[in-house]
Image (cartoon, helix red, strand yellow):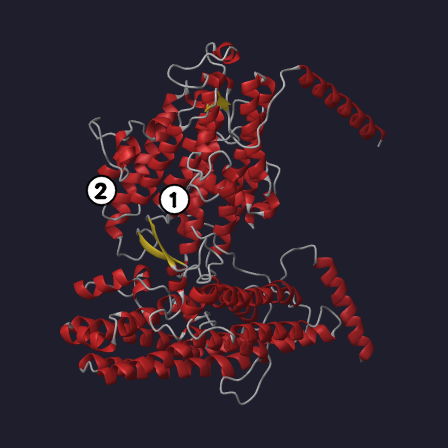
Amino acid sequence: MKLLKICTLLISGLVFWACSSDEEPQVNTDNFDRGAMLANWADNIIIPGYTSYTASLITLDEASAVFAETSTIENLEGLRSAWLDAYTLWQKVSMFEIGKAEAIALRDFTNIYPTNVETIESNISTGDYNLELPSSRVAQGFPAIDYLINGLASDDALITDKFNQDPKYGTYLKALTSRLNTLAQEVLQDWETGYREAFISNDGSSATSSVNKLVNDYMFYYEKFLRAGKIGIPAGVFSNTPLSDNVEAFYKNDASKILFSTALDAAQGFFNGDFYDGSGSGISLDDYLEFIHSNGSSEDLNTLINNQFEISRSRSQMLNDSFFLQIENDNALMLNTYDALQANVVLLKVDMFQALNIKVDFVDADGD
Amino acid sequence: MNKVFLSLIFTTILLASCSDDSDNGPSIDNPETYSFERNGQSTVSFTGQTTRIQMAEELISAMMDFSTSEALQLEMYRNETADGGDANPYSDPALNADNKNIKSKVAASRDFFFTNTSTSSIIKADFEEWISGQVNKVFPNENTVAAPGIAGQIADGSSTRFVNSKGLEYNQLVAKSLIGALMADQMLNNYLGTAVLDEADNRASNDSELLEDGTNYTTMEHKWDEAYGYLYGTSADKTNPNASIGSDDSFLNKYIGRAENDNDFAGIANEIFEAFKLGRAAIVAGDYTIRDQQAQIIREKISEVIAIRAVHYLQAGKNALPDDRDNTALYGSAFHGLSEGYGFIYSLQFTRQLGTDLPYFTHNEVNAMLEKLMGDGDNGLWDVEPTTLDELSEEIVAKFQFTIDQAAN
């Protein structure tokens, strides 16, 4: 038996070697149980994530209806709390832009920031808007709600005045929470009515297999939204000067750190296969890398990547709750966090992809 | 091996004899920056090029301003009214006061279009067709979601793009095609050619420092500077333009910067600038051999950048095509890349092959490539096949010294 295994390994090694001049990695030569990993992701992380998230959106939708009906400071506070809960839970599912979420571009309709105040105000005053248009993405989702409930005026009494004086604000607020709710429900329902099975059974290793696709989606999220969107762009990594008003939840001001740290935890949790409810851990990329490592190839990437997540976490813990204030007062700490996140891009996107024989399926658009 | 060794020796001997020659010629004072003076005053002038780049900037931003009219955009292209009267279409009063315009310099080089006004007029009209298409076909569908056969808006990441019924962004066609039709054509095929540099008695007047009336430069110096201005006309420091290369305009400067930032081509911005500087210094010294060698370097490198970007965007478009070809919402990134690619392919007809009077791809060859790009189905880019994009990429790199992979990343 043992001899047979060694022979198989040798032969697959040879096949692999012979194919390695072909630059399109398609043939998976390992026998890691990808199906079990997909099942763990779907059943213990993704579906529970969307379940909690959609529940929080129902609460948010209700709170916005209550506030639109009776615009008191007390109801405003209730609405803000529901908004922050849902926004926080969003951070745990934002990375799973696959299946229906990809088809309807869930993330871009949920969380594009900075939001466009001019478009929001114009939508409200004319009442003539179509939230399904790509151009209206900058006037909806959590960032637009942030403006309505935190940024509309300089204090709470003045914000409630606005809603009391002009019912169009309440109408628009309800349209936004309702749309968030509809989109998320659509994604959850798809997972619950067939997509879960399709996702798990697509357990091969081609470019369109579930593992290859979701690992790419995860990487794209990590680079573009976690690293760049939450830290790099506002810290000025991609511009001549820092853009402190580009932080997430700009109008709330003190929530950017909690949203980031939730997202960072979720990204590491997914890597390690941690159950959404915290009750345990299942098969994920950490095990896959261990498996490859124990078969004699590559470095101990599991440890290296987890260590780098810890470095990112410890550096980000030194940041102010408000990234806006952090950037204004001491941007070096933001850049320090960015560097730690960036170091993991190399480990994940280069080393892990290579170890798992997955090809990167996205390129950075050059942004013009 | 021996042959190689021998030819190396010969080359060395040849090189040595060449450098002997130039030692005997006029000595060239090559400055650190693009600064040339006579009697304590600068002799460098290219305000007309700066003006045209600025006019082109206003035109491409107007094309994305849904409140502008077709008439206004066409006035920005022609700097005159539809009936030929004086127009003031620009937001910058200095541009309105100027009587220069974009259109007369599109496809208007001495070497390529002096006796080919028929092609020149077709090319000039292409830009008008794209401008009119933007206003008449895309603007009315501002709030329509684009679909096969239907113009409208489409998401590209967090950006929103506006495309025609075949998936093309007219504003990208105009911006990227101007890089060839205006900047490269004027530079490579007009001002850097001997037909312009050595026209009439330019050499004699340059040798004797006979200055143009009311100026501090000879005609030949000025022609060379005008070539320079199409690349560096809006640079932050026009004497040391590589300090901000890539961020000074939306045209040639921007994409020299993009090529420079790709490790496979790093150094190219410096090669281009050094050739401009040495060529200008050679004119001051009256060394026309060195001047023409620098012109060749510039022609080669600028042509290469246009080809690199054409392949880059073809490959970016290919990689961005959605897995689910039926999901029309996911085409935006591919369309954006391919619209830029369309413009860079269009620009290939203004490149210059070394030692010839020809572009790397002729007008007809470019048209055939564009027809191929748009021809996989009735709806243009909605139907484009990855193999088509690879074939076009291969067709381009076959004439250059870089690979698809080098251009793609």
Tell me the residue at 62%/37% (across/down). B401
* Spot occupied by residue B13 in the image (x, y as percentages of width and height): 77, 22
Q: Chain of mark 1?
A: B
Foreground residue among A331 and A72: A331
Foreground residue among B282 and B5: B282
* Spot occupied by residue A105 in the image (x, y as percentages of width and height): 39, 66
Disc 1 on helix, strand or loop? Answer: helix
Which of pointers 2 and 1 lies earlier in the amino acid sequence?
2
Residue lying furthest front: B40
Q: Amino acid at mark 2?
A: Ser
Q: Amino acid at mark 1?
A: Gln
Q: Is residue B332 visible?
A: yes
- Label for residue B69? 2
* Spot occupied by residue B316 in the image (x, y as percentages of width and height): 50, 51
Mark 1 neighbour density, 10 Å: few (under 14) some (14–19) many (20 or more): many
Tell me the residue at 48%/76% (across/down). A261
Q: Is residue B106 visible?
A: no
